[in-house]
Image (spheres, grey):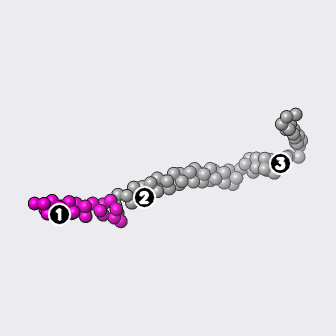
Amino acid sequence: MRWLTGGLIALIILLQYPLWLGKGGWLRVWEHDRQLRVQKEATKKLEIRNAGLDAEVRDLKQGYDAIEERARFELGMIRQDEHFVQIPERAPGK
């Protein structure tokens, strides 16, 4: 009877090994699931960024308002009938 019990315990251990540590075992499934969640978060951030860039490209293609805004803020351009006034900030401690 003792050898039967030992044999069944050994059989259970042999059956459990591939389930936990084998190529398709639970440990690998958990690791792949964690990697999948991380990748989905990164993909979601990139989709949001791409949607913003897509909206900006469509705006630049369709109208001149976005082009004018970029020219004003990034290049400091003004129209012919406007006057540019720059007010310098005070240095800290003065």
Q: For the residues carrying marks 3 and 2, which lies nearer the camera in this image?
A: 2
Tag 2 residue: 32
Q: Is residue 4 magenta?
A: yes
Question: Where, by quadrant of the figure, is residue 94 drawn?
Answer: top right
Q: Where is residue 65 in the image (x, y as percent from the top left)?
A: 74, 47
Q: Which residue is drawn at 30% across and 60% down?
A: 19
What separation in Å lies between label 2 and label 1 (alpha carbons)? 34 Å
Q: Is residue 13 magenta?
A: yes
Query: Total marks drawn?
Result: 3
Element assignment for label 3: loop
Query: Disc 3 vs disc 2: Cβ atoms closer than 8 Å?
Result: no
Element assignment for label 1: helix
Locate residue 73 relative to residue 88 in the image: left or right.
left
Callout 2: 10 Å neighbours few (<14), some, many (20+)? Answer: few
Q: In which quarter of the image is the N terminus?
A: bottom left
What separation in Å lies between label 3 and label 2 (alpha carbons)? 50 Å
Locate residue 14 relative to residue 62 in the image: left or right.
left
Callout 3: 10 Å neighbours few (<14), some, many (20+)? Answer: few
Q: Residue at x 35, y 65 (%)?
A: 23
What separation in Å lies between label 3 and label 1 (alpha carbons)? 84 Å
Q: In this view, does 77 lie above or below 2?
A: above
**Residue 58 visible, this orientation:** no
Tag 1 residue: 7
Element assignment for label 2: helix
Residue positioned most to the left: 1
Magenta residues, start to end? 1-24
Tell me which amino acid carries mark 1.
Answer: Gly
Disc ID at residue 89: none
Disc ID at residue 76: 3
Q: Principal SS element in the magenta part?
A: helix
The residue nearer to you, when weighing 38 against 14, is 14
